Every structure is written in structure tokens, then in C-alpha cells.
Amino acid sequence: MKADYLSYQRATNRSLLGLVIQLALGLLLLLSGNFTSDQAAITAGLMVLLGVPVWLCLAVLYDQHRRERIEAIEAESFAASDAASSSVFESNAEDMRVAAKRLKLLYKFMIPAVSLLVGAAMLGIGIVRFNASSAHLAAWKPPEARGWSIAFGFGVAFIGFLFARYMAGMAKQKVWTNLRGGSGVAVGAALLGLAIVVGQFVDVLGPDVVLRYLIVAFPIAMIALGSEIFLNFLLDLYRPRKPGEFPRPAFESRVLGFVAAPDRIAESIGEAINYQFGYDVSGSWFYKLVQRAVWRVLLPVALVSLWAMSTLAVVRPHEKGMVLRFGKFQRIVEPGLNFKWPWPIETVEVPVYTKKDPQGKVMYASRTVTGVRSVDIGTTPPEAGKPVLWTNDHAGKEVMFLVQPWNIREDAGSKDLAVLAAEIPLHFTVTDVLAYEMLGPPELRDDLLKAVAQRAVMQYFSTLSVGDLLAADRTAVRRELTRRIEQAFAAVNPDATGKPRGAGVGILFVGLDDVHPPKETAALYEGVVQAEQKSLKAKTMEAEAEAIRTLVGTVGSVELADEIVREIDTLQAMTPPGVPTEEQERQLAEQRTKIRSLIQTAGGKTASVILEASADRWARHMGERARLSVYQGQLRSFQAAPAYYKASLYLDALRAAMADARVFIVDGKSDLHIRGDMIDRETVGDVFQTPQ
């Protein structure tokens, strides 16, 4: 094609059209990423927008080519005219070619500057997005509007690839060679949109590994393309040039150029083979036969083999898979190599495990069913190293529970309620993969389990009082909490018939820690505790004073009382469990004597009691001894004169009986009747009184 200004005018118009399309595709991907919360689409949009300077540079370059061609035509017309021979216009022809000089300046400065700018932007944005991809990958979840993502991605892929092929076809003409840089950025946008669509379809029909790792793949692609631009720039500095030949722009990606014009790959391979063998191998009948066999036999066989490999499913050791046939559950597969029907008849799904921070933000996501998982039903744990007091904010998020007042029986007539916060960590494992997977979406399962457990906790706490929860013994409370939460989990997740399948989890531990009132009322609780502590301290001091008074009054001094107690403890330690020997009996007697001596030496009530007891013991001993002597004398009297002894005892007894009685001595044979007044009158003397 002739390199006239009309050709360059057409290239300029196509470059401006490419600029508009590139800008529209980039904005479309950005809007799609923001609308669907897809970080990969946002990265793709930034990468596509970096192609806008390329199209702008090509438009300026081809417009300057157009101006240079017009200037050349005018110069040729002027040189052929008679005016050129006049002395007024005698000058160097190069001085009249202003547009040509500007064109050289564009190739010398603008093209390298734009290339370096685009390359630096690719590297910078790629590195920033790659560093942020780890956080995005940990908090990754499927886009909210999958249909819109597929529609946007397919539209970008279709428009980008169609326009890239059109530009690549134009670039086959020598006059439009530089359009290969524009076709490269256009096909790059198409590849990004196609990757999003493929990732969405793979996520629907199988695992989400493709869609998940696009967040990392797109920044890596940006870094690679930016590095290629700088490499092209360095190689172009040392590439020899022919006179009149314009350099290729460094922003023209050779890799994307092959994708935009795949027929060039076969041409390049054919040219290399021809060069090695020295003749036109690609034009021979054998080469064409092999080429036809590759496309008709080998490629279909490769595709069928790849599809047949989908019958194999590898489940990793920490996973358990569910085989779905057209989306319907069939069976559970264990870790290892498993066989299934090929995709899309059967697919293998593994439940997703998500780990969240105290604020509820997803920190990590992985496909696994092993390990211990935890959910904070109540207040979140405090930060490490932060003091845990009732009066300060030590938890990330306080969860309050309604409980009964201090004493339910005392406050039976009151309808008031109390509020307490508590840390209730729940640790569980997945026991039923199907029930756990059917419980809900991966990002909502922990929230659902937390809500069910909180309801059970609230129902149970509403029957307890503040004293029950603040008491030291909470083992029974934890056991009851575990039982109620297990019952609550077993009653969720109904199947098609309405029968609950359960949550599919097994509870390992339910804790109950850091039970405390709200921060605003903590001071009142502390006031009650302080009052009780003061009362306890006063009672303790009073008891200690009473103990000192008692000890001083008992043994004279506290120090001597401690010494006596030590000696008593020694006596108890010396006492054998059985019958003591003579030596032990002697030692025990010495120890008792020592203790008695200490007590008597100390004085006090104890010594007085011991002395009184000793005196009573001595008086009783002597009295009993006197009775023994009297008895022995009576025994000797009886043995000497029994009749006399008996008469003496009889008369003594009669005397004792009549000592205070009125006695009448009469004849026993007479019938005597006595009538009288039993009134004692004063007499001069007592007839029964023994005279002095």
C-alpha cells in the first residue's frame, strides 16, 4: 500500500477509535469490579486503561506522518515550479521540511517516553496490586452478581479481540506496522475479559481455584508486560538500523502480538524450519499433511484426553469431598484418588473454611474439613497485653446477656433484669460434611452457628441470676450450656421433608470466662465488694483482738500460748497409735509434765483452773481415804462383836429417824385411842435434847 497522507489519515482515525474503545473497555471493567466487589476485575480495568496512552501516542504519530506526507507533496510541487529557481527561495531543502523534523523528534523522544511511562505504570501498579493480593485473597469470596461479571467479561473479550484482529490485519501493511502496538493492548483487554469469564464458568461447574487466583495472576501479568517494555527499550538501543527506517515502539508487546495475529506464529515456525533445512519445507506436501493431521487428529485427541482426565478427583488429606451429579448430592469421597463421571456430569465440592478477625472481616479462606474451628458466642477476647478490668474497655466487641437479679427468690416480686457480659468461646469440628455444606454459604456458616448458639445461651442465662454467673463454680453452667447448644444445633438445617439434619458439627468445648457487668455499673459492683471487704477486715481485726484477749487471759501472753501449742502438737506427734511401751510412756509423762509446768508458770485462767482441779482432786482423795479408814474400823468392830455392832447400827438408825419426830411410847397390847391437838407449844426445855 502506498504511504500517502490518506493512508496515514485512516490510521489516525483508527487510532482514535482504538483510544475510545480502550477507554470504554477499561471503565467497563472498573465499574464491573466495583459493582460486583471483584478485585481481579479492578486490576484488569487498570491494566486496560494503561493502553489508552498507547492509542493516543499512535494517533499523534500517524497524524504527524500525515502532515509530513502533505509537506512532502507540497515540497515536490514547489521544487517543480519556476519559483523554486528564483534567488528569493534559494535555500536548503531540509530547512523547509518542518513536519519531517517533528516526526523524527516524535520517534526520538515521544515514543520512548510513552513506552517508559507505560512500562513504569505497569510495574508500579502491578507491584502494588500484587502486594495487596494476599489480603484480597484471604478475604476472597465469589463476586456478588455472577451474571453481570460474565456479561461484562464476555463483552470486553468479544469487542477487544474483534478490534485487535482488525488492527492486526491492518498492521500487515508496512505503512501501518506500528498499529501492532495498539492491537497488542486491545487483545490484552480481550484476554483479561476472557479470563474472568472462564473463571466464572469454572467456579460454577467446579472448583473456584481459577477465579480465586485471578487476583494474583493479573498483577503478575502487569509486571511481566512492564518488564517486557523495558527489555524492548534496552534491546532497541543496541539494534542496528537501516537509513530511513523508523524504530519499533517499545510498548509493542511481542507476546500479545502473537495472540492478536496467531497466523504469524505458524509463519515464524515455517520460516525457521525453512532456514534450517535450506529450502521451502513448509510448502512441501509432507509438511501440509502433518499440519492437517495436527489440526484434525492430534488436537481432538488432546481435547478428549483432557476431558477424560476430569474423571479423576484428588482429595487432599485435610479434605472430604462431596460428589455432585448435575448439582445433586451423590456420595462422600475420602482423601486420596477417587473416580467419578467426567465433567460436567459429576463434580467434587469441598466445604470452604473461613477465618475471621474480631471485627468479622474474613482473614483467611481455605477448602478443608479438618482441624478445630472456633466461634465467639459472647464478648470477643481482649487484646494481648491489655489489662482486663471491669472499668476499662478491654474487649473488641461487648455482647450483653439478660439475667435475673442477684437472688431470684428474694426478688420474686420484681420484674427487673440485670445485664452481664461474658466470653463464651465455642470450639467445634465438622462431623457431617453434607449437613455442614447445606447449612449455608461458606461466609455465613459461622454467623449462623453463632446466632443459633447465642439464642440458646440467652434462653439459659435468662433463668440464672447474677450470683449464679459470678460464682466461682461454673462447671455445671458450662455443662448445661454445652447440652443446650448441642440441642439447638441438632434442630437446624431441615431437609426437603422438613426433618432437621443438624449443623453437621461436633462441639468440643464451650467456655465461660470473664463474666462482668457493663462498664458503667462496674463501679457500683466494686462499691459493694469494697464494703464487704471492709466489713470482713473489721471482723477479722475484732477476731484477732478477741484471740489476743483470750490467750492473754488464759495463759498470760500470746508468745507463751504459741509455745504451749507447739508442745501440745509435739505431744500428739509422740503419741503412738497402739499401746505405748514403757519408754514411750515415760517420754509422754515427761512431755505432759513439761506442758503442765509451762501452763502453771504462765498463770492466767488456765493455771487457776488447773490449781483448782488439783485442790479438788486432793480433797476428794483425802475424803475417800477417810471413808476407807472408817470402813476398815467398822469391819474390825463387826468381826469383834457382831451382835453389838448390829444393835449399835440399829439404834443409830432409829435415833436418826426420830430426831425430828414426835414419839409416843405406849404398850403394844392395849387398844389405845389418842385424840389431841398436834400443835407444838413452847416448853421450857426439849425433853429429847441431851443435857449439856
Image (cartoon, rainbow, N blue to C red):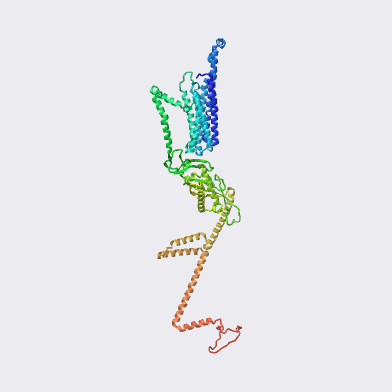
Q: Position of residue 125 (x, y in %)?
A: 51, 32
Q: Is residue 611 above or below residue 420?
A: below
Q: Is residue 89 above or below residue 213?
A: above
Q: Nearer the viewer, residue 141 or 516?
A: 141
Q: Nearer the viewer, residue 226 or 648?
A: 226
**In this rendering, does residue 131 appear at all?**
yes
**In this rendering, does residue 384 appear at all?**
no
Q: Position of residue 536 (x, y in %)?
A: 56, 56
Q: Is residue 142 above or below residue 19?
A: below
Q: Is residue 396 above or below residue 476?
A: above
In the rendered view of the protein, which quadrant contains the C terminus? bottom right
Q: Nearer the viewer, residue 636 or 84?
A: 84
Residue at horizontal 41 percent and vertical 29 percent from the top: 294
For the image, the number of numbered tags is 0
Q: Position of residue 356 (x, y in %)?
A: 51, 42
Q: Position of residue 299 (x, y in %)?
A: 42, 31
